[in-house]
DNA sequence: GTTGGCACTCTCGTCTTCCGAGTGCTAATA
DNA sequence: TATTAGCACTCGGAAGACGAGAGTGCCAAC
């Protein structure tokens, strides 16, 4: 099982070079680049063994070597030098984060866009909300035919809706409804809002016009919307910059898959706790469409028991080191801004934790 | 200048066929398909003349003919049979519209997505808002450190923001601020909110904690956000389905241009009044990136003096007839739902109005 | 004005050839 | 025993050759 130091160096050199150039790497190139003092012939012997061990493969006899998923896995687990972001980069990210997070609620959207811009790969962001409840109701009387529903949720977001009526209501009724809903519709989950409950509220308020149902419908809508995981995808088109996606059909397939939204959820579910970065290489992905792409996922604390995920998709020949560093920093920044208490301090980089795999012999 | 009836028929046949197959059209095919009783030799003569006149061109000697932008223009202006949507199609669109418009405020997003789904081309939607003002302020006291700002705008949308304070406020202060802001910050535009005004409000409210500035900042944010034109793009990846975008570089260029957002604004500005559909063919587009694509734009009434635009982008070999019909219907549906009073009735199809061009001899 | 016929042109797919990068193996060397 | 130099071999990809087919332009006949 042991793999010699020199083999590791050589493997690392192959992966580095291949990530850089996207072309199979030959023994000669390695002899020169990697500073180990031996000739190309020696390297060739080592390469042949690395192929046998399953870390490399050759597209055909007499081409250079290309990493297998297993080779990438080894690279990510042990060989790759964890990249530190430069000061400019961290500042740049922070600046952008500050700019983006000004805005209201479309953060998911902004996060994915930002991740895509930073990495130059398609990115997707999603949050998995835990059960949300309504914390308080307010009904603002505008005029006899109009009122505004304002609902504050347990995750501290606020939703509103303008309601226009074909008939008139008086302010008293509004007040009555407001206190009734505050009494019986708060701190309950979506599925606890039953027709029965609505009916009894309607009777209690002496509401002959069905306002209760309107309000209840809004409550249901808001709750289901907020507790459904939301996803946003950005930068699909960046795929086209990658040589492995020069085939339009291949690109199209993956892009429509991505545009479809949060399909990476299967990966997300198995995702462990706090700030870590996970790398899924080629066949390690569950989704068929991703079997020959790689995904890097970071998780952040979005406040109120909510975790968010940022994922970046690219060819297996992805620049893991740079992407992981950037996502990690981005996630930490988001946790710090959105999260509860104990977020890591500003400049910290997260530990890379890798999905267990190794030697499972996928081909 | 006159162009014989037969020539028109032939031209129409060429365009139809080319739109269908994306392959140069030969004389023989036309002789068979278009039901004019003459032989391929005759057609050949006519075709040669149509090339001379600039309506057609051949990729090389001994290939079939392909329409020039001028040919498409003629087709769109005079030849194309205005497609009527089938009953199923109109019902489908209406159903989707109803489903989509349930949702809150992200309509632009939904509109573009819908347009893209319907046409199978990338689509983009945008609104050009006229000056928006705040109609009323409400401040909801939650607890000593928290309140909710609710703002209703002249375009009937409602925005809110949760504000948390490091210090305590009492309910009286909130009330005072609420009535002050309702008095002096309503019905004014963004640029009328001056530091002077904020200062005087602050003094009047005896607000030593700077709450006025927080509220005013929110007002400014909401106003600028609502009056800025917003744009949404969807379905960029559908480009890859088109044979003319099999070249990944070409596809990439256009897709990044589109993802960039509302760049079609230049076209939008010159866009006339109400419900019409406009077609911009190839070089008629101002944007360099669109010079060999076509754009179909429809406009709808989004209520409160706001107009929205829906644009669809595709190759010049776009199915103008179908796209125009769908967009037109979609726009009418939106106008009906969002617009002020006098929207056209349900089943109505809009008149196609075409940007003047003709014989300007672009090549 | 229309038509059939025919020679001509040009693209596209297939096949062949050739070049070079890179390998694997062997024999010599430290 | 590990390394190295040398060399024959392999294979993909670029470049050229070639034939088939689609479509044209033109001419002479109707």
Image (cartoon, coloured by chain):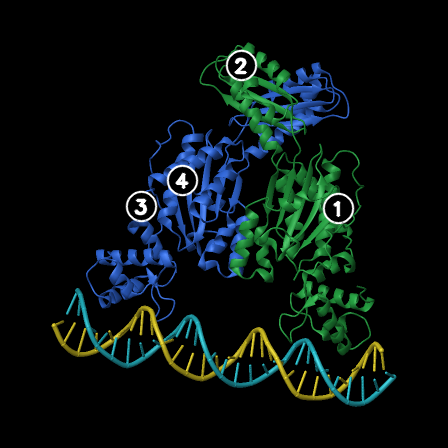
Chain colours: A green, B blue, C cyan, D yellow
Q: Are the residues flagged by discs 4 and 1 in contact, CB closer than 8 Å?
A: no
* Chain letter behind tag 3: B
Q: Secondary structure at mark 2?
A: helix
Dot 1 or dot 2: first in sequence order is: 2
Tell me: A121 left or right of B247: right
The quadrant in which the C terminus of chain A is found is bottom right
Q: Which residue is mark 4?
A: B272
| Vertical placement of residue A215 versus B319, above or below | above
Q: Which residue is mark 3?
A: B82
Labels 1 and 2 in the same subunit: yes
Crowdedness near tag 1: few (<14), some (14–19) or many (≥20) residues, C-alpha within 10 Å: many
Crowdedness near tag 2: few (<14), some (14–19) or many (≥20) residues, C-alpha within 10 Å: some
- C30 and B316: which one is in front? C30
User: In the image, what residue occupies the spot 62% across and 17% down?
Assistant: A184
* Chain letter behind tag 2: A
Tell me: A207 left or right of B147: left
Q: Are the residues flagged by discs 3 and 1 in contact, CB closer than 8 Å?
A: no
Q: Is residue B313 visible?
A: yes
The quadrant in which the N terminus of chain A is found is bottom right
| Percent x, y of residue A242 | 60, 59
User: In the image, what residue occupies the spot 31% across and 50% down?
Assistant: B80
Q: Which residue is mark 1?
A: A276
Q: Nearer the viewer, mark 4 or mark 1?
A: 1
User: In the image, what residue occupies the spot 70% across and 44% down?
Assistant: A271
Gap between marks 4 and 2 measured at Cα: 49 Å
Q: Secondary structure at mark 1?
A: loop
Tell me: B136 left or right of B281: right
């Amino acid at each position: 099982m042991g793999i010699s130091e020199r083999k590791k160096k050589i493997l690392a050199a192959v992966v580095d070079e291949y990530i850089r150039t996207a072309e199979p790497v030959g023994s000669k190139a390695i002899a020169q680049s990697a500073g180990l003092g031996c000739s190309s012939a020696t390297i060739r012997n080592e390469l042949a063994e690395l192929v046998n061990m399953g870390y490399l493969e050759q597209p055909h006899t007499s081409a250079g070597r290309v990493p297998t998923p297993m080779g990438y896995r080894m690279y990510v687990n042990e060989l790759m030098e964890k990249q530190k972001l430069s000061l400019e980069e961290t500042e740049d990210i922070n600046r952008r984060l500050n700019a983006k997070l000004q805005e209201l609620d479309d953060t998911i959207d902004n996060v994915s866009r930002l991740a895509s811009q930073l990495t130059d790969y398609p990115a997707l962001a999603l949050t998995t909300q835990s059960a949300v409840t309504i914390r308080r109701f307010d009904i603002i009387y505008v005029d006899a035919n109009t009122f505004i529903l304002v609902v504050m949720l347990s995750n501290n977001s606020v939703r509103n809706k303008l309601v226009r009526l074909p008939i008139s209501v008086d302010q008293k009724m509004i007040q009555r409804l407001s206190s009734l809903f505050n009494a019986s519709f708060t701190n309950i989950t979506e599925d606890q809002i039953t027709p029965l409950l609505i009916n009894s509220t309607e009777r209690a308020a002496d509401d002959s016009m069905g306002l209760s149902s309107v309000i209840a419908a809004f409550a249901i809508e808001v709750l289901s919307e907020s507790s459904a995981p939301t996803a946003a995808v950005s930068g699909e088109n960046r795929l086209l910059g990658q040589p492995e996606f020069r085939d339009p059909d291949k690109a199209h397939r993956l892009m429509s898959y991505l545009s479809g939204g949060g399909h990476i959820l299967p990966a997300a579910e198995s995702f462990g706790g706090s700030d870590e970065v996970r790398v899924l290489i080629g066949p390690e992905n569950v989704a068929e469409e991703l079997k020959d792409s790689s995904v890097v996922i970071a998780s952040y604390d979005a406040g109120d028991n909510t975790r968010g995920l940022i994922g970046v998709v690219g060819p297996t020949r992805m620049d893991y080191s740079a992407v992981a560093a950037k996502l990690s920093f981005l996630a930490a920044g988001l946790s710090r801004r959105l999260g509860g208490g104990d977020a890591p301090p500003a400049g910290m980089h997260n530990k890379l934790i890798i999905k267990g795999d190794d030697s499972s012999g996928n081909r």
